Image (cartoon, helix red, strand yellow):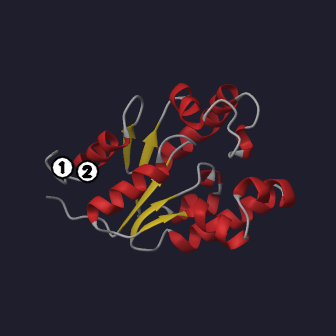
Amino acid sequence: MAELPETLVLVGAPGAGKSTIGAKLAQRLDLPFTDVDDLVAERAGMPIPEIFLSRGEAAFRELERDVTLETIGRPGVVSLGGGSVMNDQIRAALAGVHVIWLDVSAHHASRRVGITGNDRPLLAGNVHSTMVKLLNQRQPLYREVATTRVDTNGLKANAVVRLVLAELGIPAEEEN
């Protein structure tokens, strides 16, 4: 079995499964789990959609950057916000960290986040069309920072966790 990196960072589009996979992966590896989106909301004292509405995207991105830079050095599994890779400082800080890109198509991501994307401010309106645009912008950046890429299309969370573990050289536990 390969030596496990101290920190595993998950990146990917909204709907890739970063929060779900991250929590399951952390549990399987007996590591702490940190969801940057949850920390951003906690620090702001309001949900992310409210941050966008009351303070604007620029203020959200600044807070996301600060929280992300504080968090990616922590041991454990860390799930980043989907747009965090757009920030040069974050991409630079990810150098030397084991980054797992949970790759998802616009079709599958749109289905996972729902028709309206109500709790995801950047996806309000036509979710699929917006997702295509986001992926066109972000996929090269996910690719740039990724140590490992895992295709999540059409897979349930446990199957993705098994793929991530396999990429890390860790045998999956037997299913009951």
The residue that mark 2 highlights is 165
Residue 41's x, y, as percent? 67, 64
Residue 28's x, y, as percent? 27, 59
Residue at (79% x, 54% y) in the render: 52
Residue 44's x, y, as percent? 73, 69
Residue type, label 2: Leu
Q: Tell me if mark 2 has few (under 14), some (14-19) or many (20+) residues whose alpha carbon lies within 10 angstroms of its own.
A: some
Q: Which mark is drawn over residue 40? A: none
Which image quarter: residue 114?
top right
Q: Distance between the residues labelled 2 and 1?
A: 7 Å
Q: In this view, does 95 lie to the left or right of 56?
A: left
Indicate whether 71 appears above or below 20. Answer: below
Residue type, label 1: Ala
Q: Is residue 65 left or right of residue 21?
A: right
Q: Which mark is drawn over residue 172? A: 1
Indicate whether 166 appears above or below 109. Answer: below
Question: Foreground residue, 23 or 131?
Answer: 23
Could you tell me if the residues under marks 2 and 1 are in contact, i.e. CB atoms within 8 Å?
A: yes
- The quadrant of the image that shows the C terminus is top left
Number of numbered tags placed on the structure image: 2
Mark 2 or mark 1: whose residue is earlier in sequence? 2
Indicate whether 141 appears above or below 22. Answer: above
Question: Foreground residue, 168 or 128?
Answer: 128
